Image (cartoon, helix red, strand yellow):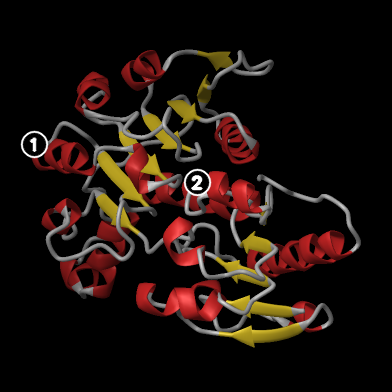
Amino acid sequence: MKIIVLDAATLGGDLDLSPLHALGEVTVYDGTTADELADRVADADITISNKLKLNRENLAGAKKLKLICVCATGFDCIDVAYCRERGIGVCNVPGYSTESVSQLTLAMALSLMGHLHEYRRHVHSGAYSRGGVANCLTPVWHEIAGKTWGVIGGGNIGQRVAGLAEAFGCKVLMCRRKADVRYETVDVDTLCQKSDIISVHVPLNDETRGMIGEKQIAKMKKHTLFINVARGMVADEEALTRAIEEERLGGLGVDVFSAEPFGEDHPYTRIMDRDNVLLTPHTAWGAIETRNRCMAIVAGNIAAWQRGETQNRVD
């Protein structure tokens, strides 16, 4: 049983891959380019990947391939319809990153609301020591308690973020397909209009692609903090950039991008030096505990498949 790990570097060099070695002959590649992919999967029984796009074009020659394991909850990078045609199983890893993503979401909100970057710079630059004043209170910062936090997406992560926001004293609005039993459920336009903080936690699909555009941004308050830890293409990145440039948004926190890594021509490069913009390199899912949990579930998915069982199948 040949198991190929195609982009191990995206999982972190400190990740323990030993659970895989009990399941077959394992070959690990730190990264795989588009030109290399077809050759590397040609003789594989099982592939494990994180960010790579696997589709009809690069899987056509993989005649032995029986199972694709995605090291993520989202599986928009896999052509599931083609895999179904071929009888190739596809497994994801649901629920593994709830704590990690929720923690970073909250950290972004607290950092932006509290202007921690600016206050840190005031001390680290020596300005505090030279100033002769015991404290510094500019820029003005605000309590998070009493604010309205709009959560877009009512899955595991959205529910956890809602609970954390509530624990900090926020009123929570929820935008999801079905009415939420705990939180007031509204449509996306109403949520954008009423919220002081907005965080996005939805998968990328035809329904969610571009769901936050100029129309929704225009409804937001000038002080609103917008946080995207879902998928880059859920939001219009150019429209968000213009909103920051024109001071129509209070702050922007983003961990996911339409292209990863994004190039020098990406809209966000125009606002990266602004204190109210916090960009992180798709790291929300990546606490070490989270990544170890992910790999354990991937190994469990393979072991279940080898036993003829169905576990976390999305095909």
Q: Position of residue 60 (x, y in %)?
A: 50, 64
Of 170 and 25, nearer the camera is 25
Graded by Cα atoms within 10 Å as few (under 14), some (14 to 19) or many (20 or more), the crowding at tag 2 reads some
Q: Is residue 308 above or below residue 144?
A: below
Q: Residue furthest left?
A: 246
Spot occupied by residue 48 in the image (x, y as percentages of width and height): 62, 69
252 or 120: which is nearer to us?
A: 252
**Which residue position is annotated with label 2?**
106
Above or below — where is 266 with respect to 109? below
Can residue 93 be seen here? The reply is: yes
The x and y percentages for residue 83 are: 59, 52
Q: Which residue is drawn at 67% across and 71% down?
A: 64
Could you say where residue 268 lies in the image, as x and y percent from the top left? 19, 53
The three-letter code of the residue at mark 1 reads Glu
Q: Name the residue under label 1.
A: 246
The crowd level at tag 1 (other Cα within 10 Å; few <14, some 14-19, many 20+) is: few
Query: Which residue does the image show at 39% across and 54% down from the upper left?
Result: 255
> Is residue 288 among the parts visible in the rendering?
no
Q: Is mark 2 on a helix, strand or loop?
A: helix
